[in-house]
Image (cartoon, helix red, strand yellow):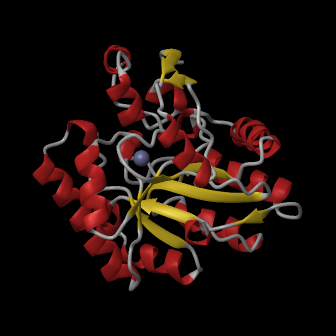
């Protein structure tokens, strides 16, 4: 467990209205977990998270629900819809197994791939797209973009978009920043490249939890809570790992299967282009 605390967002009325129009919930105060606690494949140390969390800038650059730095897509006010998203792949060891699970339930999902991994696994990128899933950009090498030079941010996003489009044959329209970390120039570059910045509203530490049941249970709690408040859920699981190309992701794949079993008769699984 990492640092946690309450962070005042000081959102103005205009900003609240904009959030409401987009179907997101405005908060004056929001419980902020560090990226470590909230599960963003953390490399920022606890000390770094506490330091960053000292002001509004930290809130805006690290909290997935923050809209201060530009328009982001999280999840609409549409209870009953679930978007499964998978980050840090493609992973030659586990992505094919995940594709089998999704196919069994006829579920389409969104895969936020790393450019470096996609370049190494072109056939796998093709297979994901041919199965009807949407592919999004998750940078080339998974840096913390809140602390990356502008020229490097542009290179990370552009190279990845190019490789994904070459391998998938389709335009890449979505970008999810590694660790959820971002700053205004990241939005500007993503927009220039024709991509919407995507966050999430349900994640757990699936990359470090060995039990698929426990991962699924933690996510179900979040899904059911959002549902009660009238929201769709944008769920993050990891089919890859930004440190190892063939990271063990059996528990995450099992959790995806559990979510499919629990919700596929009562809910609609959507890809992000349906939002
Ligand atoms: Zn990631």
Residue 22 relative to residue 146: left or right: right
Location of the N terminus by quadrant is top right
Instruction: Locate residue 155, reporting x and y percent.
Output: 17, 59
Q: Quadrant of residue 123?
A: bottom left
Location of the C terminus by quadrant is bottom right
Residue 207 shows in this picture? yes
Q: Which of 25/177 is in front?
A: 25
| Residue at the spot 22% in from the left edge and 49% down from the top edge | 185
| Residue at the spot 52% in from the left edge and 74% down from the top edge | 128
Instruction: Locate residue 274, reporting x and y percent.
Output: 62, 71
Instruction: Locate residue 41, reporting x and y percent.
Output: 43, 37
Instruction: Locate residue 236, reporting x and y percent.
Output: 57, 48
Q: Which of 71/36 is in front?
A: 71
Extreme residue in the right direction: 265
| Residue at the spot 34% in from the left edge and 78% down from the top edge | 165
Residue 51 relative to residue 127: left or right: left
Residue 91 shows in this picture? no
Q: From the viewer's perspective, is residue 246 above or below residue 147? A: below
């Amino acid at each position: 467990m990492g640092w946690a605390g309450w962070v005042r967002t000081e959102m103005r009325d205009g900003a609240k209205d904009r959030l409401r129009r987009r179907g997101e919930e405005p908060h004056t105060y929001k419980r902020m977990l560090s990226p470590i606690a909230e599960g963003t494949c953390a490399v920022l140390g606890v000390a770094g998270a506490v330091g960053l969390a000292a002001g509004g800038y930290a809130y805006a650059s690290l909290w997935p629900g923050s809209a201060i730095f530009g328009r982001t897509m999280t999840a609409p006010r549409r209870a009953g819809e679930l978007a499964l998203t998978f980050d840090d792949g493609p992973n030659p060891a586990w992505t094919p197994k995940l594709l089998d699970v999704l196919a069994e339930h006829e579920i389409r999902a969104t895969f936020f791939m790393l450019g470096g991994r996609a370049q190494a696994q072109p056939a796998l990128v093709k297979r994901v797209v041919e199965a009807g899933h949407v592919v999004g950009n998750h940078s080339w090498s998974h840096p913390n973009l809140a602390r990356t030079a502008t020229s490097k941010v542009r290179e990370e996003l552009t190279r990845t978009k190019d490789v994904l489009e070459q391998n998938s044959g389709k335009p890449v329209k979505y970008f999810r920043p590694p660790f959820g970390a971002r700053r205004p120039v990241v939005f500007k570059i993503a927009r220039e490249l024709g991509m919407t910045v995507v966050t999430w509203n349900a994640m757990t530490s699936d990359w470090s939890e060995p039990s698929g049941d426990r991962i699924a249970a933690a996510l179900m709690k979040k899904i059911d809570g959002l549902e009660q408040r009238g929201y769709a859920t944008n769920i993050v699981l990891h089919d890859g790992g930004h440190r190892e190309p063939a990271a063990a992701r059996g528990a995450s794949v099992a959790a995806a299967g559990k979510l499919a079993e629990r919700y596929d008769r009562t809910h609609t699984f959507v890809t992000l282009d349906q939002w």
